[in-house]
Image: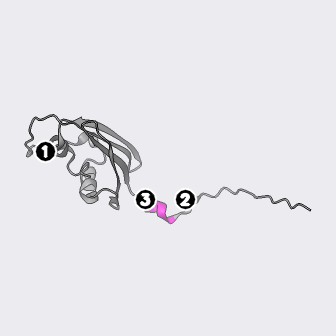
Amino acid sequence: MRTLVVAALVAVPLFAAHPAVAEAPSGALVLTRSVNGGQKVVAKLLCDPDGGSHPAAKQACDLLRSVDGDLAKLAYDPGRICTKEYFPHQVTAAGTWKGQAVRYARTFGNRCEMSAVTGDLFTF
């Protein structure tokens, strides 16, 4: 004799009821950096609370908070003096900030220029 087992699927709104959703970070970004066309280095950045695999998460999140997640608003630090050597640093950021999509890609002439604009955001 064979037994037939029937499973019923029930839709349950897990996200609405799960307490961790209320504590989800306002910013979750995947950051990449490559130097002179080399291999990409990747870090995950979470903000509010600050964390992820980024070694300077608090500083990076503070920078993001200063521009409300809009990396296009980042400006060159006038106190930085950089040389004119060309050793390109390509960076990207993709993810969300307070529910809004974030997409950023830029090539800087060298590491100094990158840091003068993005601070600790891509120092990993």
Q: Which residues are magenta?
A: 19-23
Which marked residue is nearer to the observer: mark 1 or mark 2?
Answer: 1
Mark found first going from the N terminus, 1 or 2: 2
Graded by Cα atoms within 10 Å as few (under 14), some (14 to 19) or many (20 or more), the crowding at tag 1 reads few
Q: Main secondary structure of the magenta part?
A: helix
Q: Which mark is residue 94?
A: none
Q: Which mark is residue 24?
A: 3
Q: Residue at x 13, y 44 (%)?
A: 77
Residue 17 drawn above or below residue 90: below
Residue, disc 2? 16
- Where residue 17 appears, as percent x and y from the top left, is 55, 62
Residue, disc 1? 77
Residue extending furthest toward the right: 1
Instruction: Say whether marks 3 and 2 touch (CB < 8 Å).
Output: no
Q: CA distance from mark 1 to mark 2?
A: 42 Å
User: Quarter of the image holding residue 73?
Assistant: top left
- Where residue 65 appears, as percent x and y from the top left, is 27, 52
Graded by Cα atoms within 10 Å as few (under 14), some (14 to 19) or many (20 or more), the crowding at tag 3 reads some
Q: Residue at x 81, y 60 (%)?
A: 5
Residue extending furthest toward the bottom: 19
Q: CA distance from mark 3 to mark 2?
A: 12 Å
Residue 57 drawn above or below residue 110: below
Residue 50 appearing in the image: yes
- Tell me the amino acid under the disc marked 1: Asp
